[in-house]
Image (cartoon, rainbow, N blue to C red):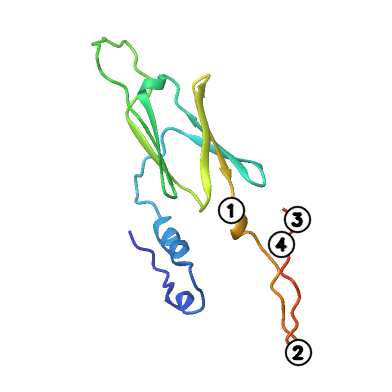
Amino acid sequence: MRSNVDFSPFYRSSIGFDRIFDLLENTAQPQGAEKWPPYDIVKLAEDSYRIIIAVAGFAEDDLSLTHEPNMLIVNGGRSNGEEVQYLHHGLALRPFSHRFELADHVSVTGAQLENGLLVIDLKKEIPEEMKPRRIPIGTGTGRSKRIEGNTAA
């Protein structure tokens, strides 16, 4: 589903932001998109995050996590090995798939299943060469100031 917003004016005044515009176009979910199971996204610190997914009834073997470049995919599905006659069936144990777009340099540091919640920890680690640095401005006399790295991290 494409959005009605035209991003072409932004392309001519920005460099290297193509991925951002693709993300904006893809944020609109089609009608009836699955929102189950519920989840929370928590910012723990400036560079660490946590995704918490309610997966009551699923075991570790029923869940899979896949970390692709800029994407985290969480799949869940139970095997229907045993036939059970339910008098009341209120637990939604249907298969699911959640896709989370990750920013550049975000990696998954751990995942655990506790009390029916799948907890996924994420950390943003910017390489040293990508951090802000000072650029010298020449004065025309041939002398320039030294480039200094940003000490505030």
Q: Nearer the viewer, residue 49 or 80?
A: 49
Give the crowd class for mark 4: few <14, some 14-19, many >=20 residues within 10 Å.
few
Disc 1 marks a residue whose amino acid type is Pro
Q: Is residue 69 left or right of residue 49?
A: left
Q: Secondary structure at mark 3?
A: loop
Residue at x 35% of width, y 49% of height: 31
Q: Earlier in the sequence, mark 4 or mark 2?
A: 2
Q: Are marks 2 and 1 in contact (CB under 8 Å)?
A: no
Q: CA distance from mark 3 to mark 4?
A: 9 Å
Q: Is residue 85 left or right of residue 67?
A: left
Residue at x 25% of width, y 11% of height: 82
Give the crowd class for mark 3: few <14, some 14-19, many >=20 residues within 10 Å.
few
The outermost residue toward the bottom is 140
Is any atom of residue 4 visible in this view?
yes
Return the residue at label 2: 141
Return the residue at label 3: 152
Q: Earlier in the sequence, mark 2 or mark 1?
A: 1
The picture places residue 97, in percent across and down from the top left corner, at 36, 37
Disc 2 marks a residue whose amino acid type is Thr
Return the residue at label 1: 127
Give the crowd class for mark 1: few <14, some 14-19, many >=20 residues within 10 Å.
few
Q: Nearer the viewer, mark 3 or mark 4?
A: 4
Q: Nearer the viewer, residue 56 or 49?
A: 49
Q: CA distance from mark 2 to mark 1?
A: 34 Å
The picture places residue 58, in percent across and down from the top left corner, at 40, 21
Q: Nearer the viewer, mark 2 or mark 3?
A: 2
Q: Residue 145 falls in which quadrant of the image?
A: bottom right
Q: Earlier in the sequence, mark 2 or mark 3?
A: 2
Q: CA distance from mark 2 to mark 3?
A: 31 Å
Residue at x 42% of width, y 49% of height: 69
